[in-house]
Amino acid sequence: MLSDKNILLVIAGGIAAYKSLDLIRRLRDRGAGVRCVLTDSGAQFVTPLSVSALASEEVYRDLFSLTDESKMGHIRLSREADLIVVAPATANLMAKMAAGLADDLASTVLLATNKPVLLAPAMNVHMWEHPATRRNLAQLHGDGIASVGPEIGELADGEYGAGRMAEPATIVTAIEAHFAGFPADAAAPPRPLRGVRALVTSGPTHEALDPVRYLSNRSSGKQGHAIAAALAAAGAETILVAGPTALADPADVTTVHAESAREMEAACLEALPVDVAVCAAAVADWRPADTAPGKIKKDGAPPPIDLVENPDILAGLAADTEQRSALVVGFAAETGNVLEHARRKLERKRCDWILANDVSAASGVIGGDSNTVHLITADDTDSWPALSKAEVASRLVARIADHFGALEKTAAPVRSDA
Ligand SMILES: Cc1cc2nc3c(=O)[nH]c(=O)nc-3n(C[C@H](O)[C@H](O)[C@H](O)COP(=O)(O)O)c2cc1C
């Protein structure tokens, strides 16, 4: 498909530069010739040796290198390509391109070119959402430069949101779409949940003993936040009801913060109706019967703590009411007999699916970045391998999209007004 095409790949200084090595391999597998320009910052992330070994070409780095100029100056570099791909495109390089700056080989080539350019931006979510980056991207699009991604998900810095470089396979699809005469958008990830309204709960709850003390659990919120981000990336109008976590609010998601189980329940009821509810929060089962108005003093014997049951948010959302969502998904965090307990929970709570996971200390799931889950439905158990929490989120969202696709085919009611 790409034989006879020459691609000039500019690799700038972002964590995602390692993915560009895979991109080079994929392009060469498709018969493309790949020449690479590496910025100084890019060379902090991948070595020129790896890049040149994969491209089978020397790597171009220095604007003023006489050797390079005698062999292949910046003008020739910029003109001999059929397409220039910048992956990762850093906020810095995009800013330089938008301003017409040319202070190193990469930016000079990009200014000197008369060939089409495709950017694969990659950066921290706040860099991506910064008004300066928005302005620069709009300018670059206005200048006829195409872009693919970024995707929404877990970022290298631990935050969730938009900023993850499009996967190499997606960039290749965008490149092929370009040569087939389609705009880069043709390769944009599909948004199968457009028109679906989703509710996700995430994180722990804090149940106050007094103004400074509370009962809680070790949930980090990473899995629930990843699911909310993945649902939004798939096009769902997503509301995240988040307990107290250290995580940033995911981009493109309406996030409501709740402290206690009762606040979380109220926020969920407020969000209804939704088409799909995913209850990933580790809601405290009990709360202190009384919350002391002032700090309990440490004098005498430790105070007894009477506990009362908290509302069961999952069971409430799954109950057979007028507002019940078409699909209610719960989590079962177990420390033993995971499948058995989870299946019983599915029946007891009357939800449609349960994602069961082992949260014993040895599993490292609580607070960690990976998860091993079993998706339990009324008549099936699907055990997934160990995956990152972002991958679990993507798989779950793909299953949800399949479910709604199947419902649509049987003309079941899926909201289409969002
Ligand atoms: C560890 C680390 C990771 C970085 N990741 C990114 C990134 O993903 N995207 C980005 O735009 N900048 C990132 N930066 C900042 C760029 O490397 C910096 O803006 C640099 O000047 C970019 O140079 P270049 O555009 O010439 O390659 C990162 C910096 C460091 C130290």
Image (spheres, rainbow, N blue to C red):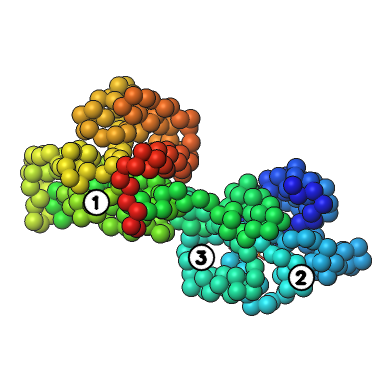
- Circle 3: residue type: Met
Question: In the rendered image, which residue does mark 3 sit on?
Answer: 127
State yes or no: Cβ of the residue under disc 3 lies below 8 Å from any atom of ligand 1.
Answer: yes
Query: What secondary structure is marked by label 1?
Result: loop
Question: In the rendered image, which residue does mark 2 sit on?
Answer: 113
Q: Where is residue 264 in the image (x, y as percent from the top left)?
A: 22, 50
Residue 179 sits in quarter: bottom right
Q: Is residue 308 left or right of residue 180?
A: left
- Circle 2: residue type: Thr
Q: Foreground mark, 1 or 3? A: 1
Q: Say which label, 2 or 1, has the lower sequence index.
A: 2
Query: What secondary structure is marked by label 3?
Result: helix
Mark 1 neighbour density, 10 Å: few (under 14) some (14–19) many (20 or more): some
- Circle 1: residue type: Pro
Query: What secondary structure is marked by label 2?
Result: loop
Q: Position of residue 295 (x, y in %)?
A: 12, 54
Q: Where is residue 283 in the image (x, y as percent from the top left)?
A: 24, 42
How far apart marks 1 and 3 lie (CA) works out to: 34 Å
Query: Which label sits on residue 273?
Result: 1
Q: Position of residue 82 (x, y in %)?
A: 78, 60
Residues at discs 3 and 2 in contact (Cβ within 8 Å): no
